[in-house]
């Protein structure tokens, strides 16, 4: 199924338990990569199904840094492709990304840019939210993560 604005809006307000058919919905886990990977059908690196023996090798990616690092096309947000709908948008300290590799650092997040909005999983609200602009998404994490170098990166989903 192709990703559309309507399909992404249907996720807003849903918990990860509503989205993940493998039942991986541990509340202490960061589910940002988990959500975008289910929404876009991405299976790179550790999958939600790998968290239980009976569902191994099924489901969607769950680690933000693994997701970024395994993408073929990625980089700084200002260098994104002309098309923007459906791009992954990552936010983290610029120091956390060196030579195209994102380190495993706790302050990183990913969403899906579509129709000018950023759809992402709010771990504090335990549900999918839609930030109304890239600027709103970026500002939210500048406040949350602190520091002067909180930066945006893009990735093209496989």
Image: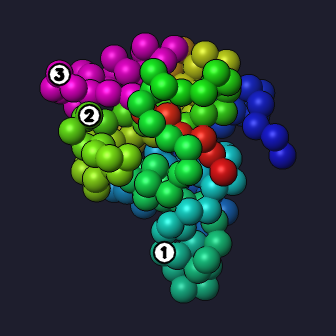
Dot label at residue 86: none
Instruction: Give the residues drawn in magenta, as a range.
Output: 133-152
Q: Is residue 57 above or below residue 72?
A: below
Q: Is residue 132 magenta?
A: no
Please state which of the two labelled residues, at mark 1 or mark 2, is closer to the viewer.
2
Figure colour scheme:
rainbow
How far, Cα to Cα, is label 2 from label 3?
A: 9 Å
Dot label at residue 94: 2
The residue depicted at 54 percent of the width and 86 percent of the height is 53
Give whichever of 143, 67 is nearer the camera. Answer: 67
Q: Residues within 10 Å of mark 1 (few under 14, many from 20)?
A: some
| Mark 3 secondary-structure assignment | loop
Q: Quadrant of residue 61?
A: bottom right
Q: Write down the residue under mark 1.
A: 51
The answer to whether the residue labelled 1 contacts the one labelled 2, judged by CB atoms less than 8 Å apart, is: no
The residue depicted at 22 percent of the width and 31 percent of the height is 145
Of all residues, the one furthest to the front in this rendering is 99
Q: Return the x and y of residue 58 as percentages of the image width and height.
A: 64, 72
The answer to whether the residue labelled 2 contacts the one labelled 3, judged by CB atoms less than 8 Å apart, is: no
Q: Main secondary structure of the magenta part?
A: helix
Q: Is residue 148 magenta?
A: yes
Q: Quadrant of residue 8?
A: top right
Q: Residues within 10 Å of mark 2 (few under 14, many from 20)?
A: some
Please state which of the two labelled residues, at mark 3 or mark 1, is closer to the viewer.
3
How far, Cα to Cα, is label 1 from label 2?
A: 30 Å
| Mark 2 secondary-structure assignment | helix
The residue depicted at 61 percent of the width and 77 percent of the height is 57
Q: Write down the residue under mark 3.
A: 148
Q: Is residue 66 above or below residue 107?
A: below
Q: Which circle's residue, 1 or 2, is located before the other in the chain? A: 1
């Amino acid at each position: 199924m192709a990703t559309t604005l309507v399909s992404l809006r249907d996720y807003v307000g849903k918990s990860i338990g509503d989205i993940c058919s493998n039942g991986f919905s541990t509340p202490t886990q960061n589910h940002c990569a988990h959500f975008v990977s289910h929404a876009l059908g991405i299976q790179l690196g550790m999958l939600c199904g790998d968290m239980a023996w009976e569902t191994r090798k099924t489901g969607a990616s769950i680690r933000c840094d693994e997701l970024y690092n395994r993408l073929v096309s990625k980089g700084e947000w200002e260098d994104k492709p002309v098309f923007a709908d459906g791009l992954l948008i990552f936010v983290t300290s610029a120091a956390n990304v060196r030579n195209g590799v994102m380190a495993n650092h706790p302050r990183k997040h990913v969403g899906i840019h579509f129709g000018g909005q950023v759809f992402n999983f709010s771990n504090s609200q335990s549900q999918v939210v839609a930030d109304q602009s890239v600027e709103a998404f970026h500002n939210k994490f500048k406040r949350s993560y602190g520091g002067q170098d909180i930066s945006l990166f893009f990735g093209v989903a496989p």
